[in-house]
Amino acid sequence: MSREELRSVLEALLMTADTPATPGKLLALLEGVTGKQLRQAVDELNEAYREGGHAMTIAEVAGGYQVVTRREYGSWVRTFHERGQARLSQAALETLAIIAFKQPVTRIEVDKVRGVDSAGVVRTLLELDLVRIVGRSEGVGRPMVFGTTRQFMSHFGLKSLADLPKPRELEELLADVEGKASENGQPSETAGDPVGQAPSAADTESDVQQTGMPQESPVDTNSEPSTEPAAAGVDEMTVEPDENDNDGE
C-alpha cells in the first residue's frame, strides 16, 4: 500500500468512526502497515488539514485516533447542536471528578467527600457510560467500586488518565481563582474543596441538562492522576477490565 493510498484509507476510516480508533484495531485491518507508518500517515493528514485551512484535525483521545473540529470553531458547533445534547450538571461533574481522581472508589466514599447522597448521580453517570463498575471491595458488605470508562476519556479529550491534572496543579489553579475573586471583592465559588460544595437537593435530581457537542480538548500535558492510595478494603478487590480496553489490540 502506497503512502497516498494509506492516507486516503485511514481518512475514510476515521471519518466514519463514531468512537476513537485504536492503533491496534487499525493495524489489524491495514495489513502490512507498521505503527510508524500509521503515525506518519496521521501526521501527514493533519499537516494537509492545516495547510488547506480545514476546520478538522485528527486528535489522540482515549488511546485512539478521532477526527474532531478545531477549538476555534467550538462556539459555532455548540450553537448548531445546542438542542438534544447532554451536559453534565454541577452535581454530576463533582461526582465524576471524585471518581476520576480517587478510582477505584465506592459510592460511600464519594458521599463522604460530597457530603450528600450520590446514588442518583452515579446511576446517571453509569447510564451515560462515563463511569463503570470495576469490581467489589473486600470491605464489609463488599460494596461495588467505580472507575471511569474509555468514553470518559473520549468525552473530555484525554489520551489517558495520566492527562488529568496533578493535585498540586489543581491547588495552584484554585488559589489563583480565589485570589482574583478577592481582588474583585467577590467571594470565590471554588474555595475549599476542589470538587465544589455540596449541591442542593435540586442538583441531585437534575443530573443532565442541554448544551452543545464536545470539542477538541488539549491532550499535551504531562499530568498524571492522583497518587493517593485506594481506600481501605479496596486494594484487594477484584477489578474487571473495560470491555473496550482490548479492542483491536
Image: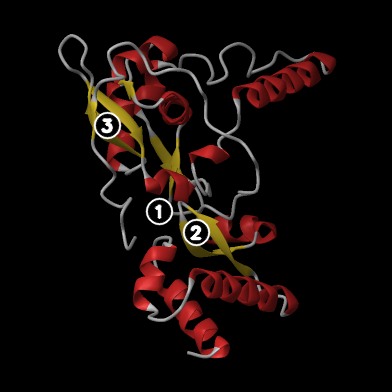
Q: Residue 152 — which label? A: none
Q: Which residue is mark 2?
A: 81
Instruction: Tell me which residue sits at (70%, 25%) in the image.
Output: 173
Q: Check if mark 2's residue and mark 1's residue have beta carbons within 8 Å.
A: yes
- In this rendering, the answer to whether 30 lies above or below 155 is below
**Most foreground residue, 6 or 146:** 6
Instruction: Tell me which residue sits at (42%, 30%) in the image.
Output: 92
Q: Secondary structure at mark 1?
A: loop
Q: Is residue 115 visible?
A: no
Q: Which residue is mark 3?
A: 123
Amino acid beneath label 2: His
Q: Earlier in the sequence, mark 2 or mark 3?
A: 2
**Most foreground residue, 11 or 120:** 11
CA gap, disc 3 and disc 1: 20 Å
Q: Earlier in the sequence, mark 3 or mark 1?
A: 1
Q: Which residue is mark 1?
A: 84
Residue at the outermost left position: 141
Graded by Cα atoms within 10 Å as few (under 14), some (14 to 19) or many (20 or more), the crowding at tag 2 reads some
- In this rendering, the answer to whether 10 lies above or below 199 is below
Amino acid beneath label 1: Gly
- In this rendering, the answer to whether 248 lies above or below 52 is above
